[in-house]
Amino acid sequence: MTLRPTRFLRLALLGDAAASAATGLLLAGAPIAGLLSLPEALLRVAGLALLPYAAFVAWVGRSAAPPRAAVRAIIAVNLVWVLDSVALLAFGPALAGLAPTALGTVFVLAQAAAVAGFAAAQAAAMRGAAEAHPA
C-alpha cells in the first residue's frame, strides 16, 4: 500500500531527513565527544548510521507515493532511537561507566525530544494521508 502524501507528511519526513543528516555529520566526525564526555566510537557509529537513514527518509519523503510500510518503519526507528537515548542516560553509567557532562545529558535529551517530535508528526501525518489508488 502506498500513500498519497500530504504537505505535512512530506515536511515531517524531509525535516527528519535534514536533521538526521546534520546530526550524522556532526557525530560522525565526533568533534564534540570531549564536550559531551561520551565515547568517540559511540558517537562516530551513531553518526555513520544516521547518514544512510537520512538518505532513505529523504527518498521516502520525496516519493510521489511513499510506501505505508516505509513510513511506519521510519516511525519505528525513530521510537527505538528515543528509547535507546533514554536507556543510554539511565543505564550507561552503571553498565558501561558512562558519565556524560551536563551538556552531554542535555544533548542526548534534546535530540531524543526532537526525534520523538518527528515520530509524532509522521504518525499524525500518515493518518491524514489518503491511500493512493493504482491508476
Image (spheres, grey):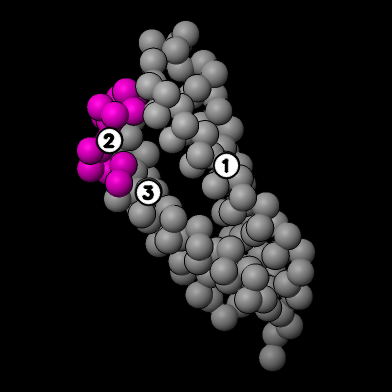
Estimate the x, y position of residue 99 in percent, counting from the top left. Answer: 39, 15
- Name the residue that disc number 1 marks: 113
Secondary structure of the residue carrying numbered label 1? helix
Secondary structure of the residue carrying numbered label 2? loop
The residue drawn where x is 23% and y is 43% is 29
Tell me the kind of residue under disc 3.
Thr
Give the magenta range. Answer: 26-41
Estimate the x, y position of residue 60 in percent, counting from the top left. Answer: 52, 68
**Numbered badge on residue 32:** 2
Viewed as shown, does residue 92 lie left or right of 35?
right
Q: Quadrant of the N terminus?
A: bottom right
- Who is closer to the viewer here, 19 or 107? 107
The residue drawn where x is 57% and y is 81% is 64
For residue 56, say whether it is visible: no
Q: How dense is the environment of label 3, judged by Cα within 10 Å: few (below 14), some, or many (20 and up)?
A: some
Q: Are the residues flagged by discs 3 and 1 in contact, CB closer than 8 Å?
A: no
- Name the residue that disc number 3 marks: 23
Q: How dense is the environment of label 1, judged by Cα within 10 Å: few (below 14), some, or many (20 and up)?
A: some
Tell me the kind of residue under disc 2.
Ile
Tell me the kind of residue under disc 1.
Ala
- Residue 43 vertical placement versus 28 (above, below): above
The residue drawn where x is 73% and y is 60% is 124
The residue drawn where x is 39% and y is 21% is 100
